[in-house]
C-alpha cells in the first residue's frame, strides 16, 4: 500500500492515518500533529480508485458497501500493518487508527474482523461496516467516534448503532457530537485530542 512513515520523538505509539474518499496519505498529517505531535505516523493511501478518487474499498452506491471487497481490503490493510511494523520497527500492539469517513470505515472494519488489531481507534464520521457478523472480542479497547447530528452522509442512527455494536464487543466507546455536517471541524479534532490524552497518552 502506498504510504508515508515518519518516526516520532516518542515512538511508543504509532498513528495510522486513513483518509476519506478522494484523499491521499498526506490529508490527515495536520490532524496527527494536533492529536499527538510526538507519535510515529503511518499514513496510508487507499488501494481503490472510484472515478479517479482513492478509497479503501469499493462501494455499490452512496452508503452501500461492496461487502466482498470490504472484507478483502480489510485483510490487505491488516497484513500491511503486520509488515510495516517489521519494516519500520514499531510496536504492532501500539497502533492508534485515526480515520475520517471512508478511512474511519476501514478502521472500524478492522475491529469487526480481528480481535484487538489496534491499541485504539479515533473514528471521524464512520458508518457501520457490516451487520451480518458477530464482532470479535475488543474488551477494553478505547474507541472515539466523532459524529455529526446533521451529517447528510452519515445519519445519527449509524453512529449510535456503531457505538452500540462496539460496546457489545467490550470496547470502551466515547461518542462525540458536532453540528458541522460531514466536515471534520477543529472542535472535533480537539475533542479527539483530549480523549487521546486521557485514554492513550
Image (tube, rainbow, N blue to C red):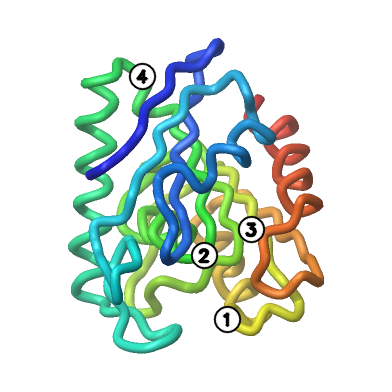
Q: Earlier in the sequence, mark 4 or mark 1?
A: 4
Report, in whole angstroms, how far the alpha carbon at label 4 lies from the one at label 3. Answer: 25 Å
Q: Which residue is mark 2?
A: 101
The residue positioned 24% from the left and 33% from the top of the image is 82
Q: Which residue is mark 1?
A: 153
The residue positioned 31% from the left and 58% from the top of the image is 113
Neighbour tally class for label 4: few under 14, some 14-19, many 20 plus, Cα within 10 Å: some
The answer to whether 79 is drawn above or below residue 57 in the figure is above
Q: Earlier in the sequence, mark 2 or mark 3?
A: 2
Helix, strand or loop at label 2? It is loop
Q: Which residue is mark 4?
A: 90
The residue positioned 68% from the left and 78% from the top of the image is 151
Q: Earlier in the sequence, mark 4 or mark 3?
A: 4
Looking at the rendered structure, which numbered label has been put on residue 145?
3
* Tag 4 near tag 1, CB within 8 Å: no
Q: Earlier in the sequence, mark 3 or mark 1?
A: 3
Amino acid at each position: 500500500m502506498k504510504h508515508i512513515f515518519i518516526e516520532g520523538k516518542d515512538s511508543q505509539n504509532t498513528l495510522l492515518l486513513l483518509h476519506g474518499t478522494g484523499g491521499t496519505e498526506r490529508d490527515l498529517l495536520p490532524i496527527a500533529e494536533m492529536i499527538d505531535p510526538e507519535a510515529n505516523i503511518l499514513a496510508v493511501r487507499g488501494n481503490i480508485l472510484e472515478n479517479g478518487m482513492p478509497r479503501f474499498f469499493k462501494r455499490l452506491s452512496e452508503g452501500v458497501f461492496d461487502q466482498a471487497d470490504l472484507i478483502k481490503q480489510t485483510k490487505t490493510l491488516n497484513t500491511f500493518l503486520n509488515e510495516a511494523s517489521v519494516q519500520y520497527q514499531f510496536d504492532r500492539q501500539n497502533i492508534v487508527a485515526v480515520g475520517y469517513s471512508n478511512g474511519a470505515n476501514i478502521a472500524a472494519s478492522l475491529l469487526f474482523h480481528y480481535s484487538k488489531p489496534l491499541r485504539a481507534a479515533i473514528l471521524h464520521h464512520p458508518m457501520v461496516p457490516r451487520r451480518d457478523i458477530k464482532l470479535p472480542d475488543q474488551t477494553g479497547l478505547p474507541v472515539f467516534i466523532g459524529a455529526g447530528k446533521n451529517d447528510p452522509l452519515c445519519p445519527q442512527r449509524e453512529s449510535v448503532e456503531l457505538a452500540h455494536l462496539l460496546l457489545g464487543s467490550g470496547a470502551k466507546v466515547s461518542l462525540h457530537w458536532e453540528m458541522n455536517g460531514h466536515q471534520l471541524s477543529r472542535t472535533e479534532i480537539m475533542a479527539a485530542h483530549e480523549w487521546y490524552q486521557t485514554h492513550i497518552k
